[in-house]
Image (tube, rainbow, N blue to C red):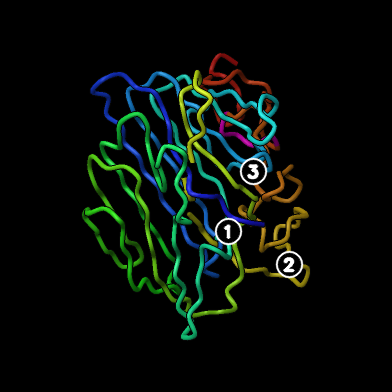
Amino acid sequence: MRILLPILLLMIRPALAQVQSETVFFLQPDGEHYLLERSIHSDSPTHRFHLDKQIRLDDIRHISPARFEWDDQSHPKLNSLSFDAGGFTLIYPGRFKDAELQRGADGELHYKSWNGRRDDQGRYGYWYSPGQFDQFTYTWIVPDNIELLRYRSNHQGQWTRRSNSVSFYAEKVNNLTFEMSYRVSDADAAPAVTTVAATEAGECPADTPLIAAVPAPGTAPAPSANAAGDTDRDAVKDSDDLCPGTPQGARVDRTGCPLDTDRDGVPDGVDQCIATPEETAVDGRGCGSSR
């Protein structure tokens, strides 16, 4: 499966609104797969995030706030999430496209977030309209077998390097692009994240038809402990299982994680109140405090 294209972010906001954007790649041991965390916070009362048609609601690992509307009918090529809130956070998986990832003879990998094309209004990379990003953060977090070598942006900003991560921070910017060079020391590292194809994604106010686009983090499950490659025997092989320790017999989704139909944080397998209304405080049984 292939990666998300760089996501362009779009929203209409009142004057003097503060727009804070954060993008975090959690790179996987193979150097190609990742999970992406994407967050936007502003004074806008509503947000809409567009995703490629191939991405289903079950493919998204995390959605906050919990109250949202999912629309997979209105647009022939896009699904969307709408929020009546001043911001949102999503986490979803992907894989770098061949065109984005150049391979050197010495094993070095070079990632470019922008394909060189601009839209009809001259926007490209990570962009926001109208206006710009007031605060923009871009981070890569890598496993121990990956060495970060070089990194740069087309905008000046503050780079912060730590042992297994590097972050870029800038203010009052727009149309950002990034290039990241790194080396994978274990070429046999297995991908740890089930990927979904995504060709376009974005966020904008619920009342605008414009599409916004962002590139797209990861954490590796424990290696397989049995010959079948399905340690917790949930019918999802370990290389695709994001929850490799699921109790036996639990109902799981395609990623191997327990289903939570009413989104109360209590898996269906132990939830005694499977249809709890959203935002209801529940106990360990998944039931409201009045029960």
Give the residue drawn at x 40%, y 42%: 123
Find disc 1 in the rendering and name its residue.
95
Indicate whether residue 20 is drawn in magenta: no
Kind of residue at disc 3: Asp
Residue at image mark 3: 59
User: Helix, strand, or loop for circle 1?
Assistant: strand
- At which x and y percent is residue 72? 68, 29
Judged from the image, the secondary structure of the residue bearing numbered disc 3 is: helix
Q: Residues within 10 Å of mark 2 (few under 14, many from 20)?
A: some
Q: Residue at x 68, y 43 (%)?
A: 54
Image-quadrant location for residue 267: top right
Please state which amino acid type lies under the numbered disc 1. Arg
Q: Earlier in the sequence, mark 2 or mark 1?
A: 1
In x, y percent, where is residue 140? 39, 58
Decide which of 9, 248 is in the foreground and name it.
Answer: 9
Q: Residue furthest bottom?
A: 106
**Left or right, residue 202 beside residue 251:** left
Residue 186 image point, x, y percent: 52, 79
Q: Which residues are magenta?
A: 264-268
Q: Residue at x 50, y 18 (%)?
A: 207
- 228 vs 217, nearest the viewer: 217
Residue 249, image x, y percentages: 76, 47
Residue 265 painted magenta: yes
Q: Amino acid at mark 2?
A: Gly
Seen in the picture, residue 15 relative to 127 is either above or below; the reply is above
Return the mark for residue 229. 2
User: Residue 151, relative to residue 255: is it above or below?
Assistant: below
Sequence-first disc among 2 and 3:
3
Q: Quadrant of the N terminus?
A: bottom right
Q: Residue at x 61, y 54 (%)?
A: 242
| Displayed quadrant of residue 224 | bottom right
